[in-house]
Image (cartoon, rainbow, N blue to C red):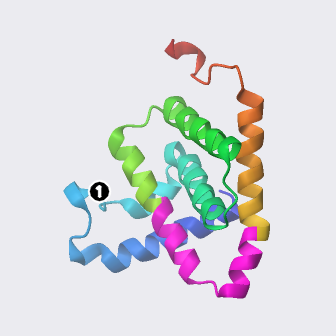
Amino acid sequence: MTRKLQRIARMVFLAAWTLGGTGAGAAGLSEGIEDVPKDPRMADLVTVIYGMNVAAQCGLVDRLVFDGYRHRVQAQILRHGLTQIDIRRAWIAADIAFELEYGNRGLGGQRNWCRTEGIDAARDFAAYRTSTMGRDIRPSGSR
């Protein structure tokens, strides 16, 4: 597990533990949310969504970045055969991690966040889209 993913997992665990007794979440979506970043099928999706949240917060999203993000999300879903519940839980986990990290930074910290994680995420999405242009992103056995 990468350092960034470990940090996301800790933030999600803390939020889930804090909200655990409140009955938060529709239809049990919050149940087990702290385990989502540790699930290898969903860990990459959580990281992708978190990265897009940071890039968007920093104003770094253009058409190429958004297309790369969209294609990367779709590829993760198809590659791991994620269900709608899996996808929603990954979204919740990524959003919780983003909100906690956002709240943990002051104005000066946010500037550095944009210069590091924000730019890295935007570049990654743009590079992914450029590398997949004209290619079918579905896994070879799913056609």
In the rendered structure, the answer to whether residue 76 lies left or right of residue 35 reads: right
Segment tinted magenta in the rendering: 94-114
Looking at the image, which residue is at 54% across and 68% down? 98
In the rendered structure, the answer to whether residue 112 lies left or right of residue 54 reads: right
In the rendered structure, the answer to whether residue 126 lies left or right of residue 79 reads: right
Looking at the image, which residue is at 77% across and 60% down? 119
Q: Quadrant of residue 91?
A: bottom left
Q: Is residue 104 magenta?
A: yes
Read off the residue under disc 1. Answer: 29
The quadrant of the image that shows the N terminus is bottom right
Percent of width and height locating residue 30: 31, 62
Residue 72, above or below 52: above
Which amino acid is tagged 1? Leu
In this orientation, which residue lies closer to the viewer: 1 or 82? 82
Q: Is residue 95 magenta?
A: yes
In this orientation, which residue lies closer to the viewer: 68 or 98? 68
In the rendered structure, the answer to whether residue 47 lies left or right of residue 123 reads: left
Residue 77, above or below 61: above
Residue 103, above or below 122: below
Q: Quadrant of residue 51?
A: bottom right
Percent of width and height locating residue 130: 77, 33
Percent of width and height locating residue 77: 49, 36
Looking at the image, which residue is at 71% across and 35% down? 129
Residue 139, above or below 87: above
Classed neighbour count for the residue bearing mark 1: other residues with Cα under 10 Å, few (<14), some (14–19), many (≥20): some
SS for dot 1:
loop
